[in-house]
Amino acid sequence: MSENAEVMRRGLAAFSRGDWDAVLAGVDPEIEWHLTFQLPDLPPDKKVFHGYDEVRTLFDAFRSVWDELTIDVEEVLHDADDLLILRVRFRGRGGRSGIEVDRMLFYVEDMRNGKLVRQRPFETEEGAFAGAGVERG
């Protein structure tokens, strides 16, 4: 496994624990984080969060909605030239609703100097590869 893939595994494990400092240790200060799910406490027109402060606000809002939450890397689908495409399993239980969620997502992760600089979620593997502009191989 590449160092970039390991950074992402550690970061998602830290996110699942709610350890924002550990998440941000693998994130570039100029991070561009694209919203995975619309949350009730966030402005409905805001889809992209920039920098540590905005991303922390997003993390806090995201975590406040879920009683339980884990995001696990299921497979690294692409790992080259500081670009990762990950298939992840998102499992959670809503805090207010109690609804359980268990679904696959695909993250396109742009890395620079061993840090995450842009995170984009996709519903399908095909969408992730198209969004990343790389051929499946």
Image (cartoon, grey):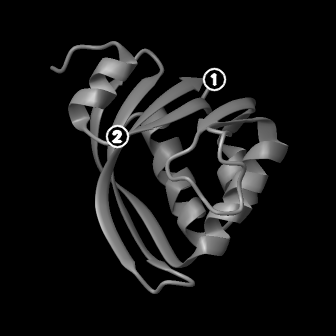
Quarter of the view holding residue 118: top right
Residue 59 % position (x, y): 68, 58
Place residue 29 in its image quadrant.
top right
The residue beneath circle 1 is 113
Q: Where is residue 27 in the image (x, y as percent from the top left)?
A: 67, 39
Q: How crowded is mark 2: few (under 14 residues within 10 Å), some or many (20 or more)?
A: many
Relative image position of residue 96 (x, y in whole percent) = 56, 84
Towards the viewer: 61 or 82: 61
At label 1, the amino acid type is Asn
Q: Which mark is residue 56?
A: none
Task: Determine if residue 20 is in view.
Answer: yes
Q: In this rendered view, identify the residue nearer to me: 2 or 94.
A: 94
Left/right placement of residue 95 relative to residue 86 reads: right
- Give the residue drawn at x 71%, y 48%: 24
User: In terms of sequence position, does the residue under pointer 2 or pointer 1 come before the other?
Assistant: 2
Mark nearest the camera among 2 and 1 is: 2
